[in-house]
Structure formats: structure tokens, C-alpha cells
Image (tube, coloured by chain):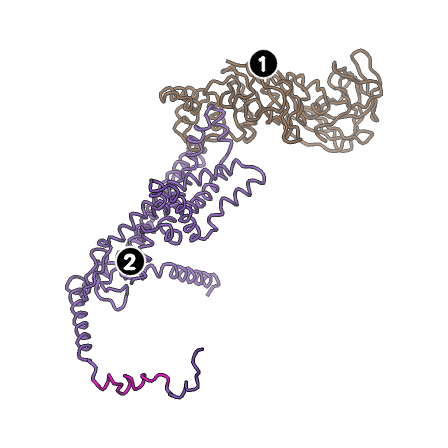
Chain colours: A brown, B purple
Amino acid sequence: MSADVELNNVSVTFGSFYAAKSVNVKINGGEFFSFLGPSGCGKTTLLRAISGFQDPSEGSVLIDNKDMSGIGPNKRPTSLIFQNLALFPLMSVSENIAFSLEVRGVSKGDRQKRADELLELIALEGQGEKKVHQLSGGQKQRVAIARALAVEPKVLLLDEPLSALDLKLRQRMRTELREIQKRVNITFIYITHDQGEALTMSDRIAVMNEGEIEQIGPCDEVYNNPLTPFVATFVGENNPLFGKVKEINQNKIKIETPDGDFVSTMNENNKLNIGDDAIAFVRPESLFMPRDGDSFDNLIDVNIESFEFEGNIKNFYATLKSGTKIKFSIPNAIDTSSISSGTKLQLGFESTKSSILPKAQLAID
Amino acid sequence: MKPTYFINFMMGMYIFIFFAYLFGPLIIMSITAFNSAEFPSISPWECFSFRWFNEGKIAYDGQHLAGLLSDWRLHDGIISSLIIGAGVVSLSVPIGMAAAIVLTQVRSQLRDIYYSISIMPVLFPGVIIGISTVVLWDRIAGLGGDGFISDVGRNGIFLTILAQTCFISTYCFLIFVARLQRFDQTQEEAALDLGATQTQVFFKILVPYLMPAIASAAVIAFLFSFENYNTTVFSILSDQTLTTVIASKVRLGISPALSALALTIIALTVIAAVTYEILRRRSEKKYAQSQEIFVKEKAASGRINKEYKAGFKVPKGIVAILLILVFATYGATQIVKNDLYGQSCIDAADQEKKSKFLEQLQTLESNELTEEELSGGSLGGTEDYGDIFGDPSLFQDFGGFD
């Protein structure tokens, strides 16, 4: 059983401060939806508004098309997984998992049965008698998930639950979370500042900044067609090239920068006019060294400054004619022994792989 | 001598002096409980005896000196102290806990004010709390005529419970505040989110978390109540607690029965402390073992040294107990050898005192004053002191009081 979650014009204020401002989003039942944003952007506030710990100052939260105002967290069909997990240290693993059943007056036998079922779901069979402190980080994580699932909530809310784990474990838990979501088939609402987590697990993501949603969409769309400079630079990496709009025709837009003119495909919601301040974005992995016979929509001259080795890729840092810094990456499989500091190169990128957006705040500022 | 030896030596000296200062009086007092003499003393040592724990004695001059077992005033005092202690615990712990929980809910500047007001009772002199309680309840008792309120308002035990709770609940409050400061509030939220009501959150999450604080607050409250004198002495009215009984005894003349009582209380305290420590260590060990098993389960097999075995160590406690036993046996044999224990010794001592007493009586009787002595004699009588103004002309010119 899953439920739709709808936020209608939700604002949360603390004094004169907007923690969240006029948020509108409709999350479909059974969807894995992520709120992605830097810390302090208001995503946890939104989660608390959905779970019932925080009343919206304006607007309404609808779960399953029912207005949730005045309904406390213990009466909502949601379960929240806390950032610190908030497992009960004085109880055993089974007692933790069955807590929600205990407070609903379910008999001890049924509780035990359900706890055993859930322990199997999270691959911790036979470990129900252990105390919380006897579990490893990943196991605690899974117990928290099982505890939240025990009452069969319609919506599961997750507040950066993976942030305390090390990289390898985090990657494994991503897959596991996604699998659990598919198995139980309920709505997952996930909060994170880690774009990798959001992109790998979610069906759709909402990118938040300063209390407002900047863009909602499927992961690849948000990554490939960011609507604002903030989204372009927060989700993944992007090289900004500042300039002015020179030409607009059909679905192409041309920008004039000190380093040359660049063409990009036009974004539908783009409200740019000729002469407006704009930024062209191109991702490090979209910049290529042209080989014989290659042709690119845009070409750019760079002067290599330094490079770093990251494993699967190599990152090169270079300066443009105007002094603008730019980063591009090349797969490790390609031989780059000819490139060193001071090398002058010409790079190319496709118009479909870049975006030109009105000038606004960047995430890296 | 290396400087570290010197420092260690000085440190040892300091610790010895410190403990001697702390426990010296207690040890001396404990020893006097076993001396059969009427007045608590170590020297002269009469006989080793348990009489002050039992019946006491009837002195050679006919005065009855009650021992611990036969002193009914002491017993009544202990019983009312226990009742008051139980009452204070059952009031102070909930009040302190409630006040501490309220503190976690209060925000802004109000919090500081609330905190200051809450801890204020510990700063008041106990005497004032005692007197003000009596004054207040005297008024209240006066309102209701002869009924229940009048009885309650003039019941010393009831008033003492209220008066002591005034400041003891503050100590409980401080204990709870310290524990609550470390409470992870998300646990409450997690429980709420899982469907618990506020009441369930309180009983299933908060109370289990506060259990250690509840226990220590109860112990502290009881001890404070049991030993309190300056508030109790006013609020107890016509009743008596252990402390007021002891105080009145000290005023009338101290007896070794008090030493016996002190030793009993010390022994009970030590036993309780030792039991607690043993239980604590046991649970700590259990926790450590479970952690060890956990580590062994988790760690790669290469990281576990399978040959490792903890060597056998003689517990230090046993050495101490053996030492005490050896000294005790030596002392006991010495006492028996020198005939300082048992009825015969006591009889001999009594006999000696009785004869001394008789001797003194006889001396007194034979010392009847002669005519010469009554009329002044060489030193006594009117000749020296009869005319205390000396020169009869001294006040000649004194005109008298007009």
C-alpha cells in the first residue's frame, strides 16, 4: 500500500526566516522521490512537515488526498528514519522493530512473528536478541528500516540515513534501499545532500536551494537539462562560461563570451532575450579532445595548468584565453602522456551537451 | 632518590593523611562501641564487650544505661526516620523529575529564571524551611476547627516530610537535569512517529532512560532525609527522629550505645556500597564480554590471536580481606589471652568500680566537718569569706541609691 504525497504551497517560517517557501510538489504513490540540496536549504524542514513534527505556517500537506493539518506524527501513515537512526538503546533488536506494534497493543506472539519476518527482509535472521550496541553501522541502518516498516506505513521518510556510513557501505546500502523499496512497494521520500545517492536511487528528484524548489524531474533530465545555474552546478559538476545572448533561432541559442561564441540547444522554459546576461554550462566529461575527422558544434582553446588522478578518470585543470578556469576529465583508458602542464589544446563539445541559462546564483559561489 | 619516588612518597603521605582525617574519628568511635565502660573511650580500656549493641548495663550507682537493642527512644526515632525517608523519597523524586522535564520543554530567557527558582530551596537555611513550614501549617490547622486538617497540620511526621521535600526535591531535580541533558530527543520523536502516544513515550522511552537517575535520586533523597537535623528539629514538633533523639542524648550525656549505632550505620553503608560496586563490576564485565564476542564475530579471523589467554590474577580484594582477617584474629587472641573479654572481666571491672565508689562514699562520710572547720578554720568558713567586703569602712560614704 502506497500513498500519494502532495505539498500545496507549503511554507515553514521560524520567526522572520523562511525555512521553506511556497513548496509545491506532488509525489506519486510507490515512487522513490528525493529532495536534494545543500545543508540548510530546508529539506529536513519539509520532511518534518510531512511526518507531522512541524506544522506548515502556510499551505497544506496531503497524504492519500487527505489534509494532514492537525494530525500528529503518531496518527499519520508515515514512518521516519532519522539521520542518527534514533534506535532505542535499551531495547533488543526485536523490541526495537516491534515497538510500533507494541504501542498499538499487538499481542506478544504476533509481534515476535512480525519482527522475525522483518529480520528476514533485512537479512538479520536470528539476531533479534542482540542489543543495538552489538550491531555494526550497516546493520543498525537496516534495523532502523525494519522498525519503520513494521507498521506497514504508506510513506517512508528517510532523513540522510546513509551519511554516517563509509563509502563502500553507503554504496551497498543504496542498492539495498532501492531493492527494499521495490519489494515493499511504498512511497519513499529521501532527503540528501549527496547528489550521487539521489541520482542512483530515485525515480525523481527535487533540487532545493534557500528554501525553494529549483527543479523537479527524473534524474537524467535534471542532470542533462538543468533549469537554473544552481541546479547546473549543484547536481554534478559544471564549467560556467559567462557571456551575453547573441542569437536565438528555433531551438538553438548562441552566447558570446570573451573566449568565443558557443551554441547550445534551447531549453523550453528559457525566457532569454538577445543581449541578456547568460551562462553557458558544459560538464567536464562532455569536453573532448578532437581527433582527426571529429567535428564539434563548439570549440574552445585551453592552456593546461595541472591534472589529478582519480582512478577511473583523470581530471585536467586549464585556463582559457580570458583567464577563466575550466575542468575536464578523460577516462583513464585513454593515453594522455602527451599532455602536461603548459600544453595548449583545443577542446570540443556538442550543443546538445551544454545548456545556456540566465545569469543567477551558482552552487559553487 | 629519584624525583618520581619522592613525588610518589609525598602523594602517598597526602593520601594517608587525607584518609586518616576523614576516617580517623569514625574508626575511634567504632572502637569505643566495644569498650564496656560507661563513657565512650578507648583508654582506659575496660573489657571487650558487645553490651552496647545489646542490653546496655545498669551502672553500679543504679543508673540504667540502655544499649542499642533496648533503647526504645532510639527505636521510635529510627522508625519515624524511616517513615519520613520513605515519604520524602516518594514526593521528591516525582517532583524533581517533573521539574527537570519541564526545564527541557521551556525555551528562551524563561529557562534561566525557571532554573534559578528551582534550585533556590537548597540555598535557604534549613532552619527557615522548618520554621516556615510549621508556621504555615499552624495557620492551616487553625482554619479547620478540630477536624482532619487540624490533626494533619499538627502532625510532626507529616510536616517533616513536607519541609524536607522542599529542598530535597531540588537535589533530585539536579540529578534529573544532568541525566536529561544527555537525552537524545530524537528518540522521543522516533517513538511518536512509530505511533506511540505521549503517555507511551513517557513510560516506554523516557522512564527507562531515567531509571538510573530515579534510583540515585531516591537514594540521595533518603540519605538527606535520614540525616537531616536542622529542618527536622523544628518541623518534627513533639515526635522524634533518629537525629533529634541522638541530639538530645548528646545533651544529656553521651553513651557508647551511640558509638554502637554509628558503627551499625557505617557497616550498613559499607555493605551497601560494596554490594553495589560488585554488581556494577559484574554488569560491566558482562558488557565487555558481549563486546568482545561482537568484535570476534566481526573481525577478520587473522586479527584474532587464538593463542591469547588472559593470565590468572589474584584479585586485590582478596588480599585486603585476608589482611583484615589476620589482624582481626590476632586482636581477638590478644584480647582473650589478656582476659579482656567475657563476663568475668566485666564483673571484675564492676567490682572494682563499686569498691572505689564505696571507698569514696566512705571517705565522704568520714570527712564530716569539724566545728573548727565550720567556723572558718584555716581555709574554709566565715573567717575568710564571711566578710567579703574586707574593709568595713569601704562603703561608709556611700549614700545609698536614691
Amino acid, disc 2: Leu
Amino acid type indicated by mark 1: Asn
Residue indicated by mark 2: B258
| Quadrant position of residue B161 | top left
Front-most of residues B137 and B100: B137
Q: Quadrant of the C terminus of chain A?
A: top right
- How many numbered circles are shown? 2
Name the one closer to the observer, A268 or A332. A268
Chain of the residue on which disc 1 is drawn? A
Residue A28: mark? 1
Specify the subunit that label 2 lies on. B
Please tell me which residue is depicted at 42% across the width and 41% down the height of the picture: B213
**Residue A29 shows up from this direction:** no
Q: Nearer the viewer, residue B332 or B120?
A: B120
Residue B144 belongs to magenta span: no
Label 2 CA crowd tier, 10 Å (few <14, some 14–19, many 20+): many
Residue B372 magenta-highlighted: yes
Q: Residue A334: where, in percent of width, then height?
A: 69, 24
Residue A123 position, x and y percent, is 45, 22
The one of A185 and A352 positioned closer to us in this rendering? A185
Callout 1–callout 2 Cβ contact below 8 Å: no
SS assignment at label 2: helix
Left/right of residue B182 with respect to residue B317 in the rendered view: right
Q: Is residue A68 left or right of residue B262?
A: right
